[in-house]
């Protein structure tokens, strides 16, 4: 099995664990921005320390980073932060399920953004596999409930937040791939580590300044919650490193499609931990998602 597939599945597993840990972080009552900041303040220093240690030991030769690298990194990092905030805002809405359904179109938006930004198109068969995967994700997400009916759902605030979040997650994925491709190293995992250290450092610094200006005292709350937030930072770093490794090796749309296996991990975790049963709809959704992932693996 190719490395990008393994990295994509591993990233999805890390992300599932992180979401489970965030339930504990909610008890600390951090703001949406504070909870997002926790991802970076506990992962950026570790990523930087690992990179600097490898450089000092002569295991990694730190290359000169171009303006294009920093441009991709800044745009990708800002897009990821904003998309995360949009997603958190959805949870406060009565009909957030509509927005979440639109977020699941992230993979399709990633295809479009990849074509516009990097000039990377996918094959007809690859696009068919992606559509099957999106269908599977929508089935797993359950029925859409909203006050509006028909086309009016597209005009709802939840739909707008969902589309914006999906588009921004697509921007971040494509930009992270663009940044990693700018790193002049042969080993994909070394390129991923350099990109991870740089991007998370920028995200940590940017959010630190934002919280100091807009939410005084929130940084102290995040730092005092290190017992819970620290583990979230570690799983976030592991997941991001795996994402970056996969982005270095493969088209971002393919990577994101395989990464949707995260939903299956979540359902299986619920069954194993809470002993809940799997519905026919969930079986159908997992079957469609599995067919999509297998199809991409055979095409890659």
Image (spheres, rainbow, N blue to C red):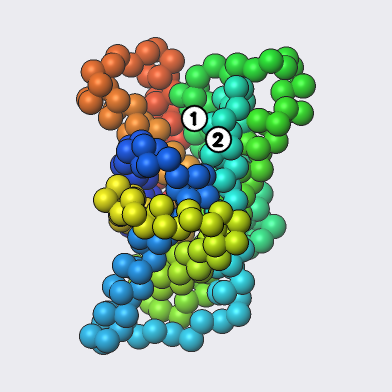
**Viewed as shown, does residue 240 lie left or right of 102?**
left
Q: Which residue corresponds to mark 2?
A: 104
**Viewed as shown, does residue 25 lie left or right of 86?**
left
Q: Which residue corresponds to mark 1?
A: 137
The answer to whether residue 128 shows anywhere in this view is: no
Residue in view at x 60 percent, y 61 percent: 213
**Viewed as shown, does residue 41 lie left or right of 163?**
left
Report helix, strand or loop for mark 1.
helix
Give the total number of marks visible in the rendering: 2
Percent coordinates x, y for residue 83 in the rendering: 58, 47
Percent coordinates x, y for residue 192 in the rendering: 40, 67
> Are the residues tagged 2 and 1 within 8 Å (C-beta)?
yes
Marks 2/1: CA–CA distance: 7 Å
Percent coordinates x, y for residue 211 in the rendering: 54, 58
285 vs 68: above or below: above
Answer few, some or many: residues within 10 Å of disc 2's Cα (few below 14, many 20 plus, some between 14 and 19): many
The answer to whether residue 271 shows anywhere in this view is: yes
Give the quadrant of residue 17. Answer: top left
Residue in view at x 27 percent, y 86 percent: 56
Q: Which of marks 2 and 1 is nearer the N terminus?
A: 2
Using the image, tell me which numbered label, if any, was put on residue 300: none
Percent coordinates x, y for residue 271 in the rendering: 27, 22
């Amino acid at each position: 099995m190719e490395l990008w597939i393994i990295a994509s599945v591993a990233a999805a597993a890390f992300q599932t664990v992180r979401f489970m840990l965030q339930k504990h972080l909610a008890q600390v009552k951090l703001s949406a921005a504070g909870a997002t900041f926790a991802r970076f303040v506990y992962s950026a220093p570790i990523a930087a320390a690992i990179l600097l240690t490898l450089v000092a030991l002569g295991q990694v030769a730190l290359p000169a980073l171009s303006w294009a690298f920093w441009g991709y990194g800044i745009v990708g990092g800002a897009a990821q932060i904003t998309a995360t905030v949009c997603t958190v805002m959805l949870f406060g809405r009565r009909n957030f399920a509509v927005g979440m359904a639109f977020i699941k179109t992230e993979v399709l938006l990633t295809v479009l953004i990849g074509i516009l930004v990097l000039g990377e198109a996918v094959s007809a068969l690859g696009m068919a596999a992606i559509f099957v995967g999106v269908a599977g994700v929508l089935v797993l997400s359950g029925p859409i409930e909203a006050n509006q009916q028909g086309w009016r759902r597209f005009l709802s605030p939840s739909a707008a937040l969902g589309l914006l979040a999906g588009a921004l997650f697509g921007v971040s994925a494509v930009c992270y791939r663009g940044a990693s491709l700018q790193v002049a190293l042969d080993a994909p995992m070394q390129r991923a580590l350099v990109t991870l250290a740089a991007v998370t450092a920028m995200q940590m610094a940017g959010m630190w300044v934002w919280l100091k200006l807009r939410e005084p005292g929130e940084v102290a709350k995040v730092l005092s919650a290190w017992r819970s937030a620290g583990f979230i930072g570690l799983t976030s770093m592991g997941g991001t490193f795996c994402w970056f490794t996969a982005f270095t090796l493969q088209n971002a749309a393919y990577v994101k499609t395989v990464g949707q296996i995260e939903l299956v991990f979540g359902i299986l975790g619920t069954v194993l931990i809470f002993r809940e049963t799997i519905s026919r709809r969930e079986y159908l959704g997992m079957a469609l998602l599995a067919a999509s992932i297998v199809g991409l693996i055979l095409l890659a």
